[in-house]
Amino acid sequence: MSKTPYIRIATPSDVSKLCEIGTKTFVDTYGADNTPENLKEYIETRFNEKQISDELNTPNTVFLLVELDQDVIGYARMRVNLEENPDEKSIEIERIYIDKAYHGQKCGALLMQACIDNAIQRGYTSIWLGVWEHNPKAIAFYQKWGFEVFGTHIFQLGDDAQTDYLMKKELSVHEKR
């Protein structure tokens, strides 16, 4: 990397960048294991500008961007999700994506630490996420950060009901990796 990646909070002017990196990373990660029809449907509904703009403007939601040389190379979406986890002191990392070209370069660790820091600063005592049961690399990454499985849920990708592990981490104000 020519410069150091950094984290910033997304603004409405970042919507197209979020759509682009979300689409790219989702296809890179899940494209080989899913049908083109299911991928297309998911991308068209989840990574269009109206959807991302609505998510960006949802209360208790924050997007953290990873930038390098003014390019967005990843992001995380954090939100309060009382439907799946009614604990008001817990926040979900709904998406955490890093461009495949930057895997293994500590960008994921930088983003995860930013998520933990953001959650602690906002007064949350735990952080949780869902991860596809067939994504061992991501599961190992989350376990390294202290996340533990506490349940499962169904992630609907088109006509394919997939099982995600739900993983949670208790937070401490002294949290640093």
Image: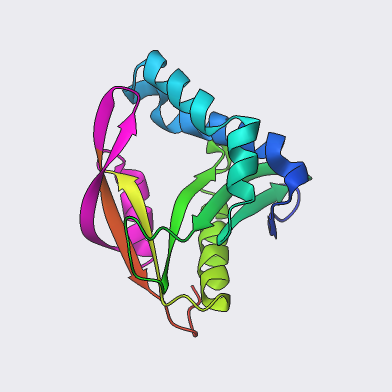
Relative placement, left or right, of 61 versus 34 is right
Residue 118 x %, y %: 57, 69
- Residue appearing at x 49%, y 85% in the figure: 174
156 or 149, nearer to the observer:
156
Above or below: residue 28 compared with residue 88: above
Find the residue positioned furthest to the left: 151
Q: How is the image coloured?
A: rainbow
Residue 106 x %, y %: 55, 55
Above or below: residue 40 compared with residue 50: above
- Residue appearing at x 52%, y 76% in the figure: 120
- Residue appearing at x 48%, y 32% in the figure: 26
Toward which corner of the image does residue 37 lie, by quadrant? top left
Above or below: residue 54 compared with residue 167: above
- Residue appearing at x 58%, y 77% in the figure: 121
Q: Is residue 136 magenta?
A: yes
Q: Is residue 26 magenta?
A: no
Residue 32 x %, y %: 37, 22
**Can residue 147 be seen by looking at this rendering?**
no
Find the residue positioned furthest to the bottom: 174
Query: Where does the magenta region start and end?
Result: 133-162
Q: How many marks?
A: 0
166 or 97, nearer to the observer:
166
Residue 164 x %, y %: 27, 44
Relative placement, left or right, of 176 versus 168 is right
Relative placement, left or right, of 137 versus 118 is left
Above or below: residue 112 compared with residue 13: below
**Can residue 8 be seen by looking at this rendering?**
yes
